Image (spheres, helix red, strand yellow):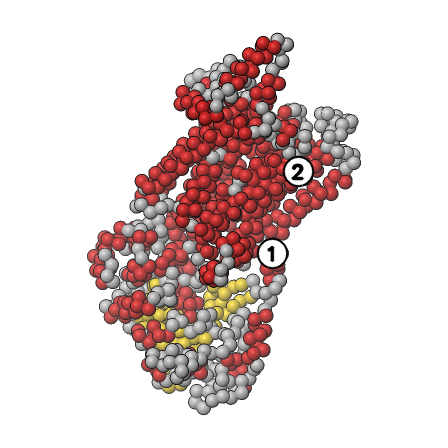
Amino acid sequence: MSLDVENLRVYYRTLHGDVRALDGVTFSVADGEITGVAGESGCGKTTLGKSLIRLDGRMRYIDGSVTLDGTQLPLENDQAMNQFRFSEVSLVPQYAMSALNPTRKIGRIMTDLLASKGVDFDDIRPELIRRLELVHLDPDVLNRYPIELSGGMKQRVTMVLSTLLNPSLLVADEITSALDVSTQKAVSELLVEFRERKFVKSMLVITHDISVLTQIADTIIVMYAGKLAEKASAETIIDAPLHPYTQLLISSLPEVGVTYERDRLSGIPGTPPGLLNPPQGCRFRDRCPLAIDKCLEEPPFVEVRPDHWAACWRIDD
Amino acid sequence: MSATPVLDTAKIDAAIDAGPQKYEGLRFALRNKKLVIGMGIVLAFLLVAIVGPWLTEATPYQFGFPTAEAPNTTRWLGTTDTGQDVFSQFVYGLRATFIVGSIAALVGAGIGMTIGFMAGYRGGVVDELLMMFTNIILVIPVFAVLLIVAAYLPPSNRGYVSEALLIGAFSWPWVARATRAQTFSLATREFVSLARLSGARSWQIIVREIAPNMSSYLVLVLIVLFGGSILFAATLDFLGLGAPNEVSLGQMLFNAQNQAAITRGFWWWFIPPGLAVTILVGALYVANVGLDEVFNPKLRET
Amino acid sequence: MIRYLARKTLLYILTFIAAVSVDWAIPRVMPGDPIQGLMARFSVPSNAQQVQGLMSFFTEAFGFDKPLWRQYLGFWQSLIDGDLGPSIAYPGSAVTSLLLHAAPYTLALVVPATILSYVVGNRLGALAARRKVLDNTFIPAAYIFTATPYMFLAIMLVYILAFRINTGLPVSGAYAFSVQPSWTWEFATSFSAHWLLPFLSLFLVQLGGWAIGMRNMIIFELEADYANYLQALGAPTKLVRKYAYRNAVLPQMSGLALALGVVVGGQIVTEVVFGYPGLGQLIFTAINNRDFFLLQGAFLFIIVGVLIANFVVDLLYVVVDPRTRVGIQGS
């Protein structure tokens, strides 16, 4: 499968005007690839994830195209998207704790959902049991109410359910944010396992925590203020990033073994720009130590090295 | 590596932080149609209640006007069987409504919030006991109790204030429940733990930390209580359980019913008071919805 | 489930005890002497002996001659015996028989009105949550209905449908003078005609409240995380709405138990306006004639009725919310 995103623009309608949360992003994800999307809060990564599945109440599709396995996804048409959801493109939500209807048994929820997609529960039951056991869940969980499960169990249930129909693309939106470190590791490894067993073809893992991505992602995309900053293989991003923002991001990660006396943690001073009226040109301009006059003109997101994309004028200086 | 930044970051940060925060809330409030119209109607009624008595030289008890007259230019709402001016009854009755409603709301809110805060903050046994108590009061049909109490209360003891106290004393359970729920969620937050660590006592924490965070909710509660109390008082008065020597809207309906105003076609005896209560309470409910929208942006429609 | 029901049963028992105690205590706590008040009602016989006799009759009836704890126990005793004392407004009749005679009429009004307004109101509210048209027309009307005091709506119904436009609907009593209560067709039609307007009055006011509540609950549920998740997985709107409706009904049902207490007031005033011979009318007469025994008895009747109704709703709740059956506390 492959995912081709071309100049996607999705804005939020507010009383004050349109917030340009996702302002023209272009990238591709190859078959079997796990792509991580990282960035600060408000950079547009969640908007990106949501746009591929379902536009929220306030979101408005403005421009651009998304092509999955050669078919263009009708993003702006909620009804038309239904046939793609769950079977072609699926979501593991951030709110797994409350993603299941509290007054229905889990098995029942699944039966209802599958039936509405034309899948007989009994047909798929053996496979479902297999997968539940794979994630160390007792099949008896199907007879329980969500409230009887722990947070971690619910997370695993949603992971199994979301991938049950073997979607081409799985969007994992901040699924590790609410978890402790050891559970994070377990869940991340599960994601990779799902890919290995071909339950899903490709993944888009959205998180603000780059350290998670270093464990599982093949490629990492770094976003800033609604636009793409850099895209490269995971190793490249960590070891040799080219975009100033990525560099600062990586350097602000704590390193094991380094103590306060040796080196201080530095964040990036300042805050991302508001997206109601985004600044002209490169949006990182105000906080970038390398900014020059040319940065008033927006740098294009181009392939600066083989398989390495970035949007910055100062790369080859 | 360090080139001169193009723009002054410090200045930009400062500008972003200042922002249009100050009057934003008020602007949203004034934009909300339901709140504006609802409150507008309530204030209009209040105005009539305050200014009214000066618009009419008659008092509600004054006799001597032509009997059973339909509304005309001199007697705006006509007269009763015994020659009393209906308009002045209406205006004074409106006053009574506001007085009883506000006192009852304050009493009900006071009791309910106190119990709710205590139960929500302390938890444990205190919570269990208080909730059992609250549930008992909740289940007992308020009206039945008010009936008995009011019936036994000698007419000489009945007045606006006692009626309001009675209503307030029995309309607090749902306030307690709601307050308790909110307090529960707030009591686990960090700023409360911080206050506790710094040695503040329970009531101080409740008053200074928790209550201000619930202020919007408490306002909504007060408005609903106010509306409910008005309905309650009107119903009690209609049954003749109100203050006997005072005029009230419910009592006007009581008189209308007892003197067969309907069959005699004297609509000006019952339509003005009944309509006033309906519109006033309706306006309060609508304003309440509007206020809720102002406080919770999620409810707003674009 | 057992725990849930046991808790509720305890609550109702405690409430009953509290209510009975309050009922017993009030005449003794209120300022003023109830016996004096009663005596004032009767034309004072010039004969001192007769005055004495009347006073001792009342004192005995109230039990004021005995020590307080005896009065209290005696009160419970008479409850168990089913003896609620003599009526003053209807001399010669026992309170218990008066109440039992009036109760069916009240039930005939309040039970259908409450149930129907709940069912219809919930449906309409759910519809309004997804049809903008309904939301903009029916919901504002619902607000007006719920803000209308019961007696005013009753009065207006009478005024418009009987006085202004002569629909021929009767506005007084439960049946025509010429008819006697019996299992005849004649009585049934007369009863129905007299029943319609008071029923409508009770029905409409409550309808507004339920519709508004349900509409808000549905909107709330449709925005919940589980709804979002289902929709993200491509579930059809029908399924999501079905889940939302089932979940929204739960708090509504809890509200039903609470609403019963408020309907009592509405019932009473509606009967007064329509001259309907139910418990409400009795209470009104009792108030006007200072018939304390009738009032006390009616109060207890109402309490028992409300408690039973609450319990029935609780049982229904267990059926509707599967979580209670698994031993987890419901709402």
Answer left or right for A257 relative to C26. left
> How would you rate the neighbour count of disc 1 (Cα within 10 Å): few for under 14, some for 14-19, many for 20 or more?
some
Q: In which quarter of the view is residue C152 placed?
A: top right
Q: In which quarter of the view is residue A127 placed?
A: bottom left
Answer left or right for C152 relative to C119. right
Q: Position of residue A269 (x, y in %)?
A: 49, 78
Question: Do marks 1 and 2 share a subunit?
Answer: yes
Answer left or right for C175 relative to C251. right
Marks 1 and 2 sit apart, C-alpha to C-alpha, by 29 Å
Secondary structure category for the residue under label 1: helix
C7 vs A73, nearest the viewer: C7
> How would you rate the neighbour count of disc 2 (Cα within 10 Å): few for under 14, some for 14-19, many for 20 or more?
many
Task: Identify the residue position indicated by label 2 in the image.
Answer: B96
Relative height, residue A246 to residue B213 (above, below) = below
Point out the residue furthest to the bottom here.
A317
Upstream in sequence: badge 1 or badge 2:
1
Q: Is residue C216 visible?
A: no
Task: Identify the residue position indicated by label 1 in the image.
Answer: B29
In the image, what residue occupies the spot 28% across and 67% down?
A: A186
Amino acid type, callout 1: Ala
Secondary structure category for the residue under label 2: helix
Q: In which quarter of the image is the N terminus of chain A?
A: bottom left
Q: Quadrant of the C terminus of chain A?
A: bottom left
In the image, what residue occupies the spot 33% across and 69% down?
A: A181
Amino acid type, callout 2: Ala
Q: Which chain carries label 1?
A: B
